Amino acid sequence: MKQSPTLFARGFCVVTALLPVCPMAAAERPAAAKIEPSSAVQTEAQRRAFVAWALSRPPVRLAAAGHRTRVLRVWSDAVKGEKGTSRRNLVLVRDYDAGVAREISALEGGTDVEIRELRGVPPSAEEIEEGMAIVRRDPALARLVANRTLRLIGGFHNRSTVADDPCAAEICLDFAFQKPAYAGPERYVIVNLTRGVVAHHDFRGARPGERPPRMTEAAP
């Protein structure tokens, strides 16, 4: 069952687009933190440990319950505040069912997490590879895949502006079969990563003055 983002608000508030900000009197508001690059380098073990801890937090688990997710990036930075500089760990997680990416962060040694819900996050190399694999195994595109003069390129994250299009809410990537010598694309295709299928086998953009087309083709 899909979870509403408002469920995050139970028990605490986090400053993010996902939740309303906790109301505070002007005198109580802390000075804005200054973000600086961290000189500390996380080891693979530290990254794995933080990801496991962050994904186990109740608000994170509640938001992604039953959803397919993927870790896109793990890193750390330094937060300079009134009490000095602290290290902050962050992980960026794609939620394919919700159609968003969530940046989950926590201060080193802390117990609370902050969550930002982000749209339009570029795909990772792993996501592009997954999308290309979906294209290559689609029987309807076998002729193009077998044509050695064409090169499969792209993997750009795009979101449909048509309200009833699944690609308006789910994670869809644009690909193209490129002709030799950069002569242009032979065919554009759209892959829906949320569903793991080719959403459109012959996508064509709108001409000037036309409404944007659906990124998901009509069912036969």
Image (cartoon, rainbow, N blue to C red):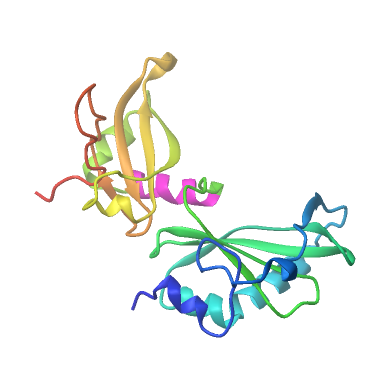
In the displayed structure, does residue 64 sit left or right of residue 105? left
Going by the picture, which residue comes out furthest to the right? 84
Residue at screen point 59% across, 67% down: 115
Residue at screen point 80% across, 76% down: 109
Residue at screen point 60% across, 66% down: 15
Q: Is residue 152 above or below residue 86?
A: above
- Residue 31: within the magenta? no
In the displayed structure, does residue 93 sit left or right of residue 212? right
| Residue 90: quarter of image | bottom right
- Residue 134: within the magenta? yes
Measured from the top left, where is residue 126 in percent x and y? Answer: 53, 51
Q: Quadrant of the N terminus?
A: bottom left
Going by the picture, which residue comes out furthest to the left? 220
Measured from the top left, where is residue 176 in percent x and y? Answer: 36, 32
Measured from the top left, where is residue 170 in percent x and y? Answer: 35, 56
Measured from the top left, where is residue 76 in percent x and y? Answer: 76, 59
190 vs 40, nearest the viewer: 40
Query: Main SS type for the magenta part?
Result: helix
What is the magenta range?
126-136
| Residue 205: quarter of image | top left
Q: Is residue 44 above or below residue 49?
A: above
Q: Is residue 150 above or below residue 41?
A: above
47 vs 165, nearest the viewer: 165
In the displayed structure, does residue 213 sit left or right of residue 145? left
Instruction: Count all numbered tags in the image, as a single digit.
Output: 0
Q: Is residue 55 above or below residue 184?
A: below
Residue at screen point 19% across, 28% down: 210
